[in-house]
Amino acid sequence: MQISWDKLRNNDEQEWKNLFRQHAEFLYAYGMKFAHNEDLVKDIIQELFITIYEKRNSLSEPVSMRAYLCMSLRNRLINEFKKEQAVSLEESDYSFTLYIDDESADEEEKQYKKIQNLLNKLTSRQREVVYLKYFKGLSNEEIALTLGINKQSVANLLSEAIRQMKKDASFILFLLLILRRIIGL
Amino acid sequence: MKEVELINILEKISSDDGYTLSFEEEIHLKEAFSHIPLLDEKPGENVLDEMEERLFSKNIIFEKSEKRIIHWRRYLSVAALIAVLFGCGLWIKNMDMKYVTGSNEQLAFVLPDKSEVKLNENSSVEYNKFLFYFNRNISMKGEAYYIVTKGQKFTVETPTHLISVLGTRFMVSETDKFDVFCYEGKVLVESLDKKEKKILTKGRSFGSDKVMLEDEPTWVSHKYVFNSAPLIDVVEALEKEYKISIENKEICKGLSFTGAFPVNNLNLALDLILAPYNMSWEQIQSDHYKIKNN
């Protein structure tokens, strides 16, 4: 559903609710990848919406609302980590973790757990890009906006990540599993 | 999608840094990833509802938020300022000083600038101890004698006139008729309606053009206040004040007196002094009196 920036500006409460509902779940999941701290993530999401609301008149419509929200959430979280740490962090030092769901009852799917090792070998930044790109379907432009880097850097990070994973034998297994799955369907 | 295709895509990506995937290729890759059971944290059942509730209802945001959160803070600072001002006002008001004398009472006191004020009977003087440091301003009724130390303008306000000086000695009386007597320096007297204005120099008064010879008001030097004084001394002081002679003073011996007597009413003065000892008096000649035991 397309959110109308004009309606938001005009204080249409329903439209604000739609905006919140449309993005909250994704933002929550994304935020939790940085820090497994539900309260922190919830607070920051709320602050985020409050800030956008307060700035709605001075703010021009974001090219991509989703990327804008992701960027704000990410910056706020990283700021929060910096505050906690006495020694200032290099931006690349933030952690971004991806976990494979091992609760799955499906025996076959448990094979995927091996992929966890693959993901663990990537840098936080690579994991983040892979997550946004392949799991969440953001475009390179949106990812560039979110991370505050240029499009080419996003493409580079993605290919670095794939290359890194390909080095591992279990990647082939991963592909085979995927194929089996697809053919099985 | 075939395995080969996927491997091709991956080959392309890893061999060429700048390679951009076609739209279709990206779809393939995404589909492959979508089969990974990634643990994507979902907010608990009511978490989103709670957040929405907090965001949109009365508490935090929207509509009211700007007014509530931000404006409250502004109101709070205004309220604090008002409270502080009010407190200061109270504190300053608390520094109001008032001196009142009843009949047959006199009072002398020193102002914060070391100026002296002597109040005659049935008079009152008011000033604010705090504001006096910035503005030497006094309001009065009745009769008062001022010995003002040199400094900033010193003003005395009566219900009808304004008297201003820099440093001088003067007496203000408005018991019967308003008048100011200047004993030293210069005094400016103005009526509040600005119609009358007169500058007094030493020995001049506001009410008449006659030159005074006294160096201070007669009532000022009359210090007929006694504290456990021998009654006989009190009677002698009375004789001197009223220029009379009193017989049979001996019966006062051994008695002591605490109190004051007026200087303008002999009968009253005698009554006041003698009544506590159960004594009375009689007039023998115009300036001759006799005390007797009842």
Image: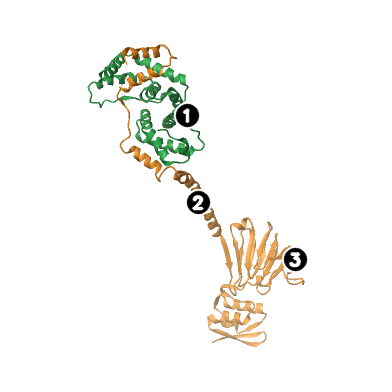
Chain colours: A green, B orange
What secondary structure is found at the residue carrying circle 1?
A: loop
Compared to residue B253, the image places residue B201 above or below, namely above
Q: Nearer the viewer, residue B256 or B208?
A: B208
Disc 2: CA contacts within 10 A as few (<14), some (14-19) or many (>=20): few
The residue depicted at 38 percent of the width and 18 percent of the height is: B24
The residue depicted at 47 percent of the width and 31 percent of the height is: A62
Based on the displayed image, in which of its 4 quarters is residue B249 positioned?
bottom right
Label 3 and label 1: CA atoms lie apart by 90 Å
Q: Nearer the viewer, residue B253 or A61?
A: A61
Q: Which residue is mark 3?
A: B202
Residue B157 image label: none
What secondary structure is found at the residue carrying circle 2?
A: helix
Name the front one of labels 3 and 2. Answer: 2
Compared to residue A10, the image places residue B239 above or below, namely below
Q: Position of residue A29 (x, y in %)?
A: 35, 30
Residue under disc 3 on the same chain as residue under disc 1: no
**Is residue A151 in sight in this rendering?**
yes
Q: Total label count?
A: 3
Q: Which residue is mark 1?
A: A63
The residue depicted at 62 percent of the width and 61 percent of the height is: B111
Residue B79 image label: 2
Which comes before the other along the chain, label 3 or label 2?
2
Based on the displayed image, in which of its 4 quarters is residue B29 positioned?
top left
Name the front one of labels 1 and 2. Answer: 1
Q: Mark 3 is on which residue type? A: Lys
Label 3 and label 2: CA atoms lie apart by 54 Å
> Is the C-beta separation of discs 3 and 1 under 8 Å?
no
Q: The disc numbered 3 marks a residue on which chain?
A: B
What secondary structure is found at the residue carrying circle 3?
A: loop
